[in-house]
Image: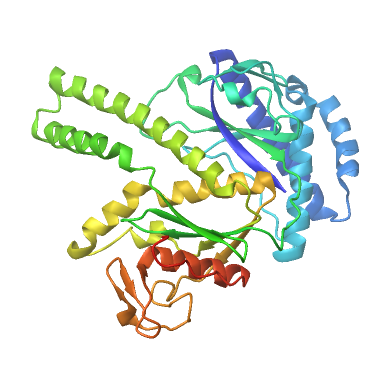
Amino acid sequence: MHRYKGLRVCVTNAQARHMDRIRASQRFVYNWAVERLLADSTLTRFDLQKLFTKLRNSTPHLREVERIHQDTAVHQARAAADVSNKYVNGNLKFRSKKRGGRLSVTCDIPLRFVNSAHASFPGLGTIRLYDEQSYQYPHHWLHGSRSFMLVDKTPRSWKRVKPGDRVYRLFVSYNLPEPEPAHTGVATGLDRGITNPTMVCKTDGSMVSFTCYDTAVSFRKNRSWNDEARRTIQRRNKHSNSTKKMKRQRNNYNWHNANARDYAEWLLAKEICHGVNVICIEDLDIEAMTRKGNDSKRGLNRGLRYIRHHSILKKVRVVAERLGIRIVEVKPRGTSQECYVCSHTEKDNRNGERFLCLSCGRLDNADVNASANITQRGTGIKVPKVPAGEE
């Protein structure tokens, strides 16, 4: 399997102008290869490269760009033809010059990092990273990198921007070893909510433990300060110096706050994945659930967005993938109304955060009960009942 990692880079005016020449060359070579493939679909990648060698030797503007970038365009045309023949009945499209779009430069060779703040590109030389990334060099994914792509991310609202002032982002594709799925061992179920943001049930079939993690509780005071600053800015004159100063302070404050929350979420992901073989999660789309809502659900949506369930789950997936832990998605319907001990299901079993089984009389927290049900549904392991007074 492979993954992508995105980094922001800083380029000089000369490098930006050369990137424009590379883009134009790749577009020309791609369209030339597509034209040849439409005439003869049996041409292989090596046949196209042999034909392109003759074209390059007779065309002056193609010799101004490194051959490695043009070979990448030939490879992409052959790959597009294979996909088109398999799914789209062989209909290949030519590349047009995008105006105001996201233009990119691609290359199918491993990227070389000089140090934690600089990377070396073929034809462009050394490019400085916007932020120094100390954890990237040396790093295990660096040795497995196989290609990269430089994408122009300059906002369309910026007018008459100099080439060196444009915003570029580097996407590195790197390989990850296929993890061997674990079928037995310690299983974990995650239940996501607001009162108990991340409820974790960990069991091996004989013993069970329930733990609640909250990475947002330490930032409640920061949230209230940020909301008050936002309301103050809205009431003031947006062109005054004091308002601009407050905006800069708020942006700087939010930037440091976001870094601290990311760090706390990475620690939580490592803690959840420690000593676990299988992780069961709810098949929920939190972003879709909180995108729209009526006035009565507005507070609930704000609470779910502030906890950042999607960000936490994304980090858990990344850590689990690197450790070879299997991820199982479970349908969440009825997990908080079903008793995980006697399997009795009824809506009246739950009343807010209180769960009382009307069949066996077990009293518990609704999120604890839901996390146990998620574990049982995902793995089939029977979660043992916790003795009274030990939860």
Q: What is the quadrant of the C terminus in the image?
A: bottom left
Q: Residue 105, position in %: x, y?
A: 64, 32
Q: Residue 8, position in %: x, y?
A: 52, 27
Q: Quadrant of residue 96?
A: top right
Q: Nearer the viewer, residue 286 or 240?
A: 286
Q: In this view, does 42 lie to the left or right of 23?
A: right
Q: Which residue is drawn at 58% across and 72% down?
A: 382
Is residue 1 something one can see in this rendering?
yes
Q: In which quarter of the image is residue 27?
A: top right
Q: Residue 292, position in %: x, y?
A: 29, 61
Q: Which residue is drawn at 23% across and 63% down?
A: 297
Q: Which residue is drawn at 66% across and 27% down?
A: 22
Q: Quadrant of residue 298?
A: bottom left
Q: Would you place residue 293 above or below residue 153 in this image? A: below
Q: Nearer the viewer, residue 196 or 253?
A: 196
How many discs mark residues in the rendered view? 0
Is residue 107 something one can see in this rendering?
no
Render colour scheme: rainbow
Q: Which residue in the rendered view is the most extreme toward the bottom?
A: 359
Q: Is residue 90 left or right of residue 317?
A: right
Q: Residue 36, position in %: x, y?
A: 81, 48
Q: Which of 329 and 17 is in front in this view?
A: 329
Q: Would you place residue 380 above or below residue 275 in this image? A: below
Q: Which residue is drawn at 55% across and 29% down?
A: 7
Q: Would you place residue 326 above or below residue 107 in this image? A: below
